[in-house]
Amino acid sequence: MDINERFERIINELFNGNKRAFAKAVGISPTVVENVVGTRKGKPSYDVLVKVCVNANISAEWVITGEGDMLKTKHISDSFTPLIESHFPHKNTDSPADNQISSPYFKYFIEQMSQKDKEIGRLMERIEQLEREKNVSEESFQPTQRELSKSTMGL
């Protein structure tokens, strides 16, 4: 399998054959994609390879040599599979939507969302902790009724 065929595999497996979606997702022009996978079979530039590897989670070793796994993240969490299935209970295995839901790229996206959600949860807990500390410190600086009386009487 040459590099052009590997590009075609990425497009077919991760983008359901949609060259335009692939181009947009990785940040290259559809013309460049067509030059690589179309009849011309041009070789991608270094910049194109970097964008594909970074933005589509593709292993540089695989895209260049064909060795190893296609995706950088080998073990994608399936923790969201029940959630996905609950939102798509009547999956038709012939539908393009089903292919998108079960694709490794979609699962990777869901995993990334889960990690960000956990990070947001930790940040929210930290904000609450800081607010509690602020309230305690404000309470310790509030004058007592006796101190207020003295200050109003000029004592």
Image (cartoon, rainbow, N blue to C red):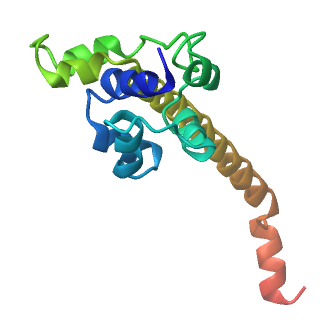
* Viewport quadrant of the C terminus: bottom right
What number of labels is visible?
A: 0
Q: Position of residue 147 (x, y in %)?
A: 83, 72
Instruction: Give the left or right position of residue 75, taking residue 105 as reference.
Output: right
Q: Position of residue 38 (x, y in %)?
A: 32, 36
Rendered image quadrant of residue 98: top left
Rendered image quadrant of residue 152: bottom right
What's the residue at 36%, 51% (across, down)?
A: 31
Instruction: Give the left or right position of residue 139, taking residue 91 as reference.
Output: right
Rendered image quadrant of residue 99: top left
Q: Is residue 134 above or below residue 102?
A: below
Q: Position of residue 139 (x, y in %)?
A: 74, 57
Q: Which residue is most to the bottom?
A: 154
Looking at the image, which is closer to me, 112 or 122?
112
Looking at the image, which is closer to me, 6 or 129?
6
Q: Is residue 6 above or below residue 124?
A: above
What's the residue at 36%, 34% (across, down)?
A: 37
What's the residue at 74%, 48% (across, down)?
A: 133
Instruction: Give the left or right position of residue 15, taking residue 7 as reference.
Output: left
Looking at the image, which is closer to me, 5 or 15?
5
Q: Position of residue 68 (x, y in %)?
A: 60, 9
Looking at the image, which is closer to me, 79 or 18?
18
What's the residue at 54%, 10% (across, down)?
A: 75
Q: Is residue 153 above or below residue 33?
A: below
